[in-house]
Every structure is written in C-alpha cells, then in structure tokens.
C-alpha cells in the first residue's frame, strides 16, 4: 500500500478516497461543507441514509462530482461537545 501526502485543495484531488472526521452528519461547515458544495447533494443524502453510526466505526459513500471515488465518514464524538475518556 502506498500513502501520499500533499498540500492541496482536497476537492480537486483525483484520489481513491477522502477521509473526513465528522462531528455532525450535516455538511454545514469546514471541509464537509466544501466537499458537499463541489460534490453535490448525493454525498449528504447517502451519508444521512447510513447515519447514525458509532464512534470508531466508519461509512463509505460515493464522492458525487468530486475527482475522488469515495468519501469515508468517521464520527469523532457521540454529540458535539462530548469528550472521549
């Protein structure tokens, strides 16, 4: 397996997958919002159809109109403001 690191606009990269940590399932801010704007509404719809999932789990959706093939959504908290032990 090869892993490449790059400093670039993630919405313009032709990669197999983009991994995005999620606090909320709605693509309202930050990287999630940028992915939703450029990738289209299918990303949000597909993610919502798979939610909720537990912290430590992940779901894979298509990447809509992005150059990436998939988006891997990984929840980081049970609820906004919650903390890990």
Image (cartoon, grey):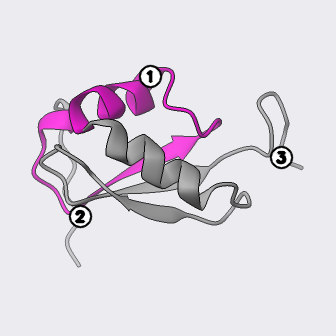
Mark 1 vs mark 2, CA separation in Å: 24 Å
Q: Secondary structure at mark 3?
A: loop
How far, Cα to Cα, is label 3 from label 2? 28 Å
> Residue visible at 43% across and 32% down?
32
Q: Nearer the viewer, residue 32 or 40?
A: 40
Q: x, y percentage for residue 85?
A: 89, 50
Residue 41 lies within the magenta run: no
> Label for residue 30?
1
Residue, x 69% and y 60% (percent of image)? 53
Magenta segment range? 10-39
Instruction: Kindly identify the residue that appears in the image at 76 percent across and 30 percent down.
Output: 80
59 sits to left or right of 12: right
| Residue 3 position in % (x across, y down) | 23, 64
**Disc marking residue 3:** 2
**Sequence-wise first label, 1 or 3:** 1
Quarter holding the N terminus is bottom left
Tell me the distance, in whole angstroms, between the alpha carbons under discs 1 and 3.
Answer: 22 Å
Q: Earlier in the sequence, mark 1 or mark 2?
A: 2
* Residue drawn 20% across the image and 63% down it: 16
Disc sitting over residue 84 in the figure: 3
Density class for disc 1 (Cα within 10 Å; few <14, some 14-19, many ≥20) is few
Q: How many numbered circles are shown?
A: 3
Q: Are marks 3 and 2 in contact (CB under 8 Å)?
A: no
């Amino acid at each position: 397996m090869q892993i490449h690191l790059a400093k670039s606009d993630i919405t313009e990269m032709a990669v197999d997958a983009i991994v995005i940590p999620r606090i909320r399932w709605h693509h309202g801010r930050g990287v999630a919002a940028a992915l939703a704007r450029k990738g289209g509404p299918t990303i949000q719809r597909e993610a919502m159809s798979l939610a909720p999932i537990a912290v430590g789990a992940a779901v894979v959706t298509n990447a809509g109109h992005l150059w990436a093939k998939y988006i891997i959504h990984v929840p980081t908290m049970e609820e906004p403001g919650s903390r890990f032990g």
